[in-house]
Amino acid sequence: MSNPFTTERTLPTNIIVHTLFGNILGIIGCALVSFFMIFVWVFTMNSEFIYILKDSDITQTQGVILSVFPTNSSENRTRIYQNDFQFVIDGNTYSNHSYTKGQRFNNGDKVTINYSPKNPTVSFIDGARREVFSKFIGIFVPLIQLPIALILIAISLIMGFKKLHLLKIGIPATATFIKMEQTITRVNRRYVMKMFFEFKAKDGSTHQTTTKTHQPEKLLDNPQEILLYDPNNPTQTVFLDNLSGKPQINKSGNITSPVPFTNSAGFILALLATFTLSLTGSYLFYLLTK
């Protein structure tokens, strides 16, 4: 089978969307981004992290503990306590609260208060927290967990763009299944299989290629499977039945898909991840700089 086109194909939007966002790594990465945002709102927004840029211009005075009681939160199995306090500046009385890991103060204790001379309502007990959780807890999600999800998305997009390139310039051929080997990777409780195929290029040369999938039955339902190979490097191939969106190649050599891009779970998750990441990032920036 030969490619009737000598120029790159123009791919429809639904093919591009399915190819970029239909990869399992991208779906997992986008889902994790949205999931991790829950932790950002619960922990980072309620941690010392939001004050990381606000520790300048602080003055001290003496205050008194009004009440001490445990919160519903704990850290390393130690209860976090809220400590309500009061202090007086220029004849004006101010009240606020700080948090400690474990009970460190009692009602009536004299304590040192850090406060902003420009706005004494911004205050906290020296050596205590202004929020429930520590800076480490606040940093853990945005700096450790979130990058894991973003790396998965980046890998998925790189793989997606490689596939798009082959969909644009690839020459179609039919491949014959040779064998498959089980890998150590699992997806949805199924082992990913490495499948070996052989095909004949347009110039008559024979080549072997491999692909990995946790759904090998998609590539075993026909005696021969359609693939597209790079004419400059026939070892670079993509199998149509191994792509999201059920792409097809018509008689004119163009790629089509009967599945609209709005049916792509990966695309919907990507939109959700983008929205939650943008909303959370904007609000976190506001908290850091207000």
Image (tube, rainbow, N blue to C red):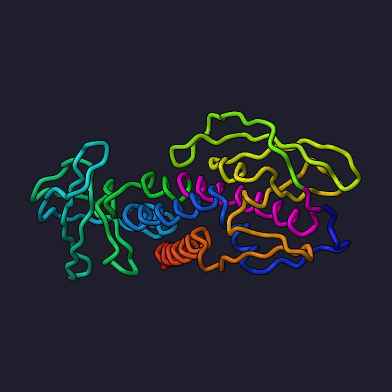
In the rendered image, the residue lying farthest to the left is 107
Up-down relation of residue 164 to residue 196 (above or below) = below
The residue sitting at 64% across, 59% down in the picture is 247
41 on left or right of 252: left
Q: Position of residue 127 (x, y in %)?
A: 28, 46
The residue sitting at 60% across, 45% down in the picture is 221
81 on left or right of 214: left
Up-down relation of residue 40 to residue 214 (above or below) = below
Q: Position of residue 68 (x, y in %)?
A: 12, 50
Q: Position of residue 36 (x, y in %)?
A: 41, 52
**Quadrant occupied by the C terminus:** bottom left
Residue 222 visible at all: yes
The residue sitting at 33% across, 52% down in the picture is 43
Q: Check residue 169 for magenta coloring.
A: yes
Residue 51 visible at all: no
> Quick one: 112 or 175, which is closer to the camera?
175
> Quick one: 180 or 275, which is closer to the camera?
180
In the rendered image, the residue lying farthest to the front is 223
Q: State the image quarter where residue 80 is shown.
A: top left
The residue sitting at 70% across, 44% down in the picture is 224
Helix, strand or loop: magenta stretch: helix
> Quick one: 108 or 238, which is closer to the camera?
238
277 on left or right of 39: right
Q: Check residue 162 for magenta coloring.
A: yes
In the rendered picture of this protein, how many numbered marks are placed on residues?
0
Q: Position of residue 124 (x, y in %)?
A: 26, 56
Magenta-colored span:
144-173
Up-down relation of residue 197 to residue 32 (above or below) = above
